[in-house]
Image (cartoon, helix red, strand yellow):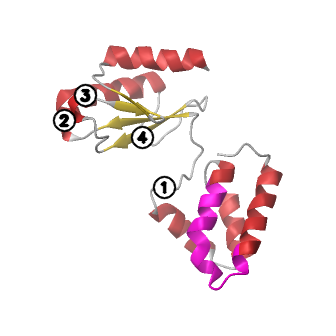
Amino acid sequence: MTTLTSDTAMDELKAYIETVKKKARPESYLIAILHKAQHLYGYLDKEVMNEIAFIMNLPTAHIWGVATFYHYFNLTPKGEHTIAICLGTACYVKGAGDLLDTLKEELKITIGETTEDKLFTLQEARCLGACGLAPVIMIDEKIYGEMTPKKVVALLAHFRTEK
Protein backbone atom coordinates (compact mmCIF):
# COMPACT_ATOMS: atom_id res chain seq x y z
CA MET A 1 0.00 0.00 0.00
CA THR A 2 1.30 3.43 -0.91
CA THR A 3 1.20 6.21 1.65
CA LEU A 4 0.05 9.05 -0.58
CA THR A 5 -2.36 11.81 0.25
CA SER A 6 -5.84 11.20 -1.08
CA ASP A 7 -5.44 13.87 -3.77
CA THR A 8 -2.07 12.52 -4.88
CA ALA A 9 -3.43 8.98 -4.96
CA MET A 10 -6.41 10.07 -7.06
CA ASP A 11 -4.16 11.98 -9.45
CA GLU A 12 -1.98 8.89 -9.87
CA LEU A 13 -5.03 6.67 -10.37
CA LYS A 14 -6.51 9.04 -12.96
CA ALA A 15 -3.21 9.15 -14.85
CA TYR A 16 -3.10 5.35 -14.89
CA ILE A 17 -6.68 5.12 -16.13
CA GLU A 18 -5.92 7.62 -18.91
CA THR A 19 -3.08 5.39 -20.16
CA VAL A 20 -5.42 2.41 -20.11
CA LYS A 21 -8.14 4.27 -21.99
CA LYS A 22 -5.74 4.67 -24.94
CA LYS A 23 -5.52 0.89 -25.37
CA ALA A 24 -7.86 -1.33 -27.34
CA ARG A 25 -10.79 -2.48 -25.18
CA PRO A 26 -9.91 -0.37 -22.12
CA GLU A 27 -12.80 -1.88 -20.14
CA SER A 28 -10.89 -5.17 -20.15
CA TYR A 29 -8.33 -3.52 -17.85
CA LEU A 30 -10.84 -2.99 -15.03
CA ILE A 31 -9.23 -5.54 -12.71
CA ALA A 32 -5.83 -3.91 -13.23
CA ILE A 33 -7.38 -0.51 -12.45
CA LEU A 34 -8.96 -1.88 -9.27
CA HIS A 35 -5.61 -3.40 -8.26
CA LYS A 36 -3.96 -0.01 -8.79
CA ALA A 37 -6.65 1.73 -6.72
CA GLN A 38 -6.28 -0.79 -3.90
CA HIS A 39 -2.51 -0.38 -3.99
CA LEU A 40 -2.86 3.40 -3.70
CA TYR A 41 -5.59 3.49 -1.05
CA GLY A 42 -5.16 0.19 0.76
CA TYR A 43 -8.75 -0.80 -0.07
CA LEU A 44 -11.50 0.01 -2.57
CA ASP A 45 -13.40 2.94 -1.17
CA LYS A 46 -16.95 3.52 -2.48
CA GLU A 47 -16.08 7.02 -3.73
CA VAL A 48 -13.00 5.71 -5.53
CA MET A 49 -15.07 3.04 -7.27
CA ASN A 50 -17.62 5.69 -8.26
CA GLU A 51 -14.81 7.78 -9.75
CA ILE A 52 -13.47 4.80 -11.68
CA ALA A 53 -16.97 4.14 -13.04
CA PHE A 54 -17.31 7.77 -14.12
CA ILE A 55 -13.89 7.96 -15.79
CA MET A 56 -14.30 4.59 -17.52
CA ASN A 57 -17.92 5.33 -18.49
CA LEU A 58 -19.03 2.05 -16.91
CA PRO A 59 -22.00 1.43 -14.61
CA THR A 60 -21.08 1.65 -10.94
CA ALA A 61 -22.86 -1.68 -10.41
CA HIS A 62 -20.38 -3.31 -12.81
CA ILE A 63 -17.40 -1.93 -10.84
CA TRP A 64 -18.99 -3.06 -7.57
CA GLY A 65 -19.75 -6.49 -9.01
CA VAL A 66 -16.13 -7.07 -10.03
CA ALA A 67 -14.78 -5.73 -6.71
CA THR A 68 -17.07 -7.98 -4.65
CA PHE A 69 -16.61 -11.07 -6.82
CA TYR A 70 -12.85 -11.34 -6.38
CA HIS A 71 -11.66 -12.24 -2.88
CA TYR A 72 -8.45 -10.25 -3.35
CA PHE A 73 -10.19 -6.88 -3.21
CA ASN A 74 -10.79 -5.23 0.16
CA LEU A 75 -13.84 -3.01 0.57
CA THR A 76 -12.88 -1.77 4.03
CA PRO A 77 -9.58 -0.49 5.42
CA LYS A 78 -7.23 -3.21 6.62
CA GLY A 79 -5.12 -3.18 9.72
CA GLU A 80 -1.39 -2.68 9.86
CA HIS A 81 -1.06 -6.43 10.52
CA THR A 82 -3.20 -9.19 9.01
CA ILE A 83 -3.80 -12.24 11.16
CA ALA A 84 -4.92 -15.36 9.30
CA ILE A 85 -6.03 -18.28 11.43
CA CYS A 86 -5.90 -21.69 9.83
CA LEU A 87 -9.20 -23.51 10.17
CA GLY A 88 -8.16 -26.52 8.10
CA THR A 89 -8.77 -30.00 9.47
CA ALA A 90 -5.39 -30.55 11.16
CA CYS A 91 -5.43 -27.14 12.83
CA TYR A 92 -9.07 -27.35 13.81
CA VAL A 93 -8.63 -30.80 15.40
CA LYS A 94 -5.65 -29.47 17.37
CA GLY A 95 -7.47 -26.43 18.78
CA ALA A 96 -7.86 -23.71 16.16
CA GLY A 97 -11.42 -23.13 17.37
CA ASP A 98 -10.09 -22.13 20.80
CA LEU A 99 -7.48 -19.90 19.15
CA LEU A 100 -10.19 -18.20 17.12
CA ASP A 101 -12.27 -17.60 20.25
CA THR A 102 -9.20 -16.10 21.95
CA LEU A 103 -8.44 -13.86 18.97
CA LYS A 104 -12.04 -12.63 18.81
CA GLU A 105 -12.05 -11.93 22.54
CA GLU A 106 -8.65 -10.22 22.62
CA LEU A 107 -9.16 -8.15 19.46
CA LYS A 108 -12.89 -7.48 20.03
CA ILE A 109 -13.58 -8.28 16.35
CA THR A 110 -14.66 -11.24 14.26
CA ILE A 111 -13.38 -12.69 11.00
CA GLY A 112 -13.22 -10.09 8.25
CA GLU A 113 -13.05 -7.12 10.64
CA THR A 114 -10.33 -4.69 11.64
CA THR A 115 -9.61 -3.50 15.16
CA GLU A 116 -10.67 0.01 16.09
CA ASP A 117 -7.03 1.12 16.34
CA LYS A 118 -6.40 -0.24 12.79
CA LEU A 119 -3.60 -2.45 14.10
CA PHE A 120 -5.06 -5.88 13.22
CA THR A 121 -7.34 -7.43 10.62
CA LEU A 122 -8.58 -10.96 11.30
CA GLN A 123 -9.02 -13.42 8.44
CA GLU A 124 -9.56 -17.15 8.14
CA ALA A 125 -7.65 -19.59 5.98
CA ARG A 126 -8.57 -23.14 5.01
CA CYS A 127 -4.94 -24.28 5.00
CA LEU A 128 -1.65 -22.46 5.49
CA GLY A 129 0.44 -25.49 4.53
CA ALA A 130 1.98 -26.02 7.95
CA CYS A 131 -0.11 -28.95 9.20
CA GLY A 132 2.83 -30.45 11.10
CA LEU A 133 2.90 -27.32 13.28
CA ALA A 134 -0.86 -27.26 13.90
CA PRO A 135 -2.58 -25.22 15.07
CA VAL A 136 -1.08 -22.25 13.22
CA ILE A 137 -1.76 -18.60 12.61
CA MET A 138 -0.04 -16.32 10.15
CA ILE A 139 0.65 -12.69 10.95
CA ASP A 140 1.53 -10.80 7.82
CA GLU A 141 3.81 -13.32 6.05
CA LYS A 142 5.11 -15.22 9.08
CA ILE A 143 3.69 -18.55 10.32
CA TYR A 144 3.44 -19.18 14.06
CA GLY A 145 3.00 -22.85 14.92
CA GLU A 146 1.95 -25.00 17.84
CA MET A 147 -0.14 -22.11 19.09
CA THR A 148 -2.17 -22.08 22.27
CA PRO A 149 -4.56 -19.42 23.53
CA LYS A 150 -1.85 -18.28 25.97
CA LYS A 151 0.73 -17.98 23.14
CA VAL A 152 -1.77 -16.00 21.05
CA VAL A 153 -2.29 -13.49 23.87
CA ALA A 154 1.49 -13.10 24.29
CA LEU A 155 2.01 -12.69 20.53
CA LEU A 156 -0.67 -9.99 20.32
CA ALA A 157 0.94 -8.18 23.26
CA HIS A 158 4.29 -8.29 21.43
CA PHE A 159 2.79 -6.71 18.30
CA ARG A 160 0.99 -4.10 20.36
CA THR A 161 4.16 -3.03 22.21
CA GLU A 162 6.10 -3.04 18.94
CA LYS A 163 3.69 -0.41 17.63
Please give the name of the residue rendered at 78% of the width and 50% of the height, measured from the top-left corner: 6
The CA distance from mark 1 to mark 3 is 26 Å
* Side (left or right) of 86 relative to 36: left
Q: Which mark is residue 72?
A: 1
Write down the quadrant of residue 20 in the picture: bottom right
Which of the marked residues, 4 or 3, is nearer the chain's N terminus?
Answer: 4
Please give the name of the residue rendered at 48% of the width and 55% of the height, measured from the top-left corner: 72
The CA distance from mark 3 to mark 2 is 9 Å
Which of the marked residues, 1 or 2, is nearer the chain's N terminus?
Answer: 1
Which of the marked residues, 4 or 2, is nearer the chain's N terminus?
Answer: 2
Label 1 is placed on what type of residue? Answer: Tyr
* Main SS category, magenta section: helix
Q: Secondary structure at mark 1?
A: loop
Write down the quadrant of residue 133 in the picture: top left
Task: Look at discs 4 and 2 and give the one toward the viewer.
Answer: 2
Residue 157: x and y in percent read 49, 15
Label 2 is placed on what type of residue? Answer: Ala
Please tell me whether residue 31 belongs to the stretch shown in magenta: yes
Q: Which mark is residue 90?
A: 2
